[in-house]
Amino acid sequence: MRVLFVFLAIFVSFAQPIIIEADQLTYEKDKLIYNGNVKVSRADGVLKAQRLVIFLDEKKRAKSAEATGQPLYRDEKRQASADSIQYDFEKEILILKGNARLQEGESFIEAPQITYFRKEDRALAQGRVRTIYVEESRDKVPADRKP
């Protein structure tokens, strides 16, 4: 049976709710542990994984999270995958560890670790890095510029 929990107490400074679906939830003193078909939605981002641990601060607000079990993150611009994905809710930073891949369109970066700073729209890849950059066609002319 799929469990749906919307924790109204879990808000970040921008007051964006976090909606989490999973097959199972275990609550401990300072963390929430979700197992099986986990889906997390917040603003324009969605994270899917088999396991998610959300670490809570002293006010029971989401501080950070770690997703494992084929985690995949998507927002309106990018897709990210790795062996594990850590997320800092306040700073909006994703840390992709192990077989990390960050993709935008056909272009992508692969590395042992990639840190993606969502607020700044930038990434830092560490370790042996592989990048494929696909340029947009130069023949494409915006409709408002065509003769």
Image (cartoon, helix red, strand yellow):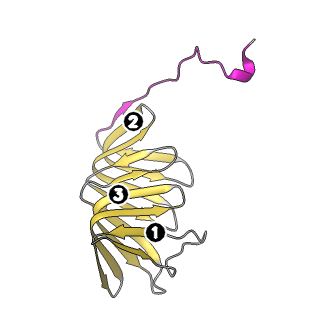
**Disc 2 marks which amino acid?**
Phe
Q: Secondary structure beneath disc 2?
A: strand
Residue in the image at 44% along x and 56% along y? 46
- Quarter of the rendering occupied by the C terminus: top right
Numbered circles on residues, count: 3
Residue that appears at 53% across and 70% down = 17
The residue that disc 1 covers is: 19
Q: Give the left or right position of residue 71, taking residue 117 as reference.
A: left
Q: Position of residue 18 (x, y in %)?
A: 48, 69
* Closer-to-camera residue (84/7): 7
Q: Give the range drawn in magenta.
A: 128-146
Image location (x, y in percent) of residue 48:
35, 57
SS under mark 1: strand
Residue 119 rendering spot, x and y as whole percentages: 56, 55
**Mark in the foreground, 3 or 2:** 3
Dominant SS of magenta comes to: loop
Q: Nearer the viewer, mark 1 or mark 2?
A: 1
- Which residue has dot 3 on it? 48
Q: Are marks 3 and 2 in contact (CB under 8 Å)?
A: no
Disc ID at residue 137? none
- Quarter of the N terminus within the rendering: bottom left
Dot 1 amino acid type: Ile
Which residue, given by chain and number where applicable, does mark 2 sit on?
108
Amino acid at the residue labelled 3: Lys
Looking at the rendered structure, the secondary structure element under dot 3 is strand
For the residues labelled 1 and 2, the Cα–Cα distance comes to 28 Å
Looking at marks 3 and 2 on the same chain, the residue that comes earlier in the sequence is marked by 3
List x then y, in percent, for residue 132: 38, 29
Is residue 78 on the magenta stretch?
no
